[in-house]
Image (cartoon, helix red, strand yellow):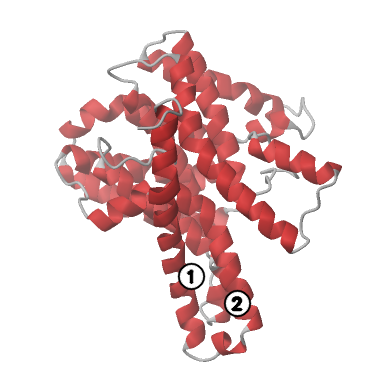
Amino acid sequence: MTDGKMGGLLGNVQALRAVAALMIVVVHLGPLLATAGLGADLGVFQAGVDVFFVISGFIMVHISRDRMPGPGNFLHNRVIRIVPAYWLVSLVFLAAATALRQWHPDGAGLGLLARSLFFLPSGDPPLYYPLLYVGWSLNFEMFFYLLFALTLALKLAPLARTIAVAALLTIPVTLVGLRLVPPSLADFYGNPIVYEFVLGMLLGLAWPWFGRMPVWSGWLGIVAGPLAMVLLHPLVEDVHRLFLAGFPGAVIVAAALVLERHGRSVRSNGVLLIGAASYVLYLSHPIVISAFNNLSRHLPALRGAGAAQAVPLAALAACMVAAILIHRGFELPVSRWLRRGGKGG
């Protein structure tokens, strides 16, 4: 979810990042869409997070295939990519919540803030939402990065690294499945959704062979993956999202990689830019949409015929514009500055 450079990355992966982030935006546009008379079950679009997780697993294997980074350097780069934008948006969200008296600087509030900023699960199960609620997925991301760094420290080969990560992820999943732990950190990290990172790692291992697959299999997967998500979504109350969205998400990512190997790569500058800014889009869109929700509630004219239908489109456009501005004006400069060790020039 968090690698935003356009150069050196695969066009189809960037395009999938853009699509995945926009899927989550659509989920949170639900109230505005309902006001516009366009209400529907948008739950299937939550699969954007699952696609992100699969992509993360793939990228970690892909970037370490030819040159294995040291665990310290790996974690340093992950922190540079994740923390600045997350802390910035979290603090903006905190300021807004404080102004609206939805957050108070008491012991509980400060504890939630601290756990949120340092990627520790907070709140109630099953997702233990942090202060910036979309940050729940980053808690899983950071857990995965720590395990991946451990395998780097052990200097394991890519296949052994994947097996080791899968084995380590199994520990909390097993503890929860056997009811050996109460709802706790193990309950959070025991969520089977963590195996979506492993699915992505397996795709990373398979990358050299995707070029041998027929190009039609890529087009088939691009259609079959989303179709499976839609058809399986009614089972959401009975079947874990790993099966409803994780495996179909892996099919989509695999299909995109097959097409990439055959030269069918997305090259649209606009799509690639949204893909590069997808992390910031994912983080910042709740604030933008919240502003539009408040405007819609307080300005009756925005709920009238015609205007109500335009508001969700305006909110979507505002989310993308805000993300691009933050990406270019904050995320990229700060990342470059931190990679230089905080030195100017």
Task: Find residue 288 and report its horizontal and vertical position in percent.
Answer: 54, 64
Q: Are marks 1 and 2 in contact (CB under 8 Å)?
A: no
Say which amino acid is labelled 2. Leu
Q: Is residue 47 left or right of residue 217?
A: right
Give the structural element (helix, strand or loop) at label 1: helix
Give residue 315's mark. Answer: 1
Q: Is residue 341 above or below residue 253?
A: above
Identity of the residue furthest to the right in this view: 107
Say which residue appears at 56% left-offset and 46% top-offset. 88
Image quadrant in which the N terminus is located: top left
Q: Report which quarter residue 143 is drawn in.
A: top right
Say which residue appears at 31% left-offset and 43% top-offset. 13
Please indicate, yes or no, whether residue 240 appears anywhere in the rendered image: no
Q: Is residue 266 above or below residue 142?
A: below
Q: Report which quarter residue 174 is drawn in.
A: top right
Say which amino acid is labelled 1. Ala
Identity of the residue furthest to the top in this view: 154
Identify which residue, 52 or 247, lies in the foreground. 52
Task: Find residue 322 and report its horizontal and vertical position in percent.
Answer: 45, 60
Pointer 2 local density, CA inside 10 Å: few below 14, some 14–19, many at least 20 = some
Identify which residue, 280 or 63, lies in the foreground. 280
Ranked by sequence position, the earlier of labels 1 and 2 is 2
Say which residue appears at 45% left-offset and 67% top-offset. 318
Q: Is residue 34 above or below residue 201?
A: below
Give the structural element (helix, strand or loop) at label 2: helix
Task: Find residue 164 and report its horizontal and vertical position in percent.
Answer: 49, 16
Say which residue appears at 44% left-offset and 27% top-offset. 77
The residue labelled by disc 2 is: 295
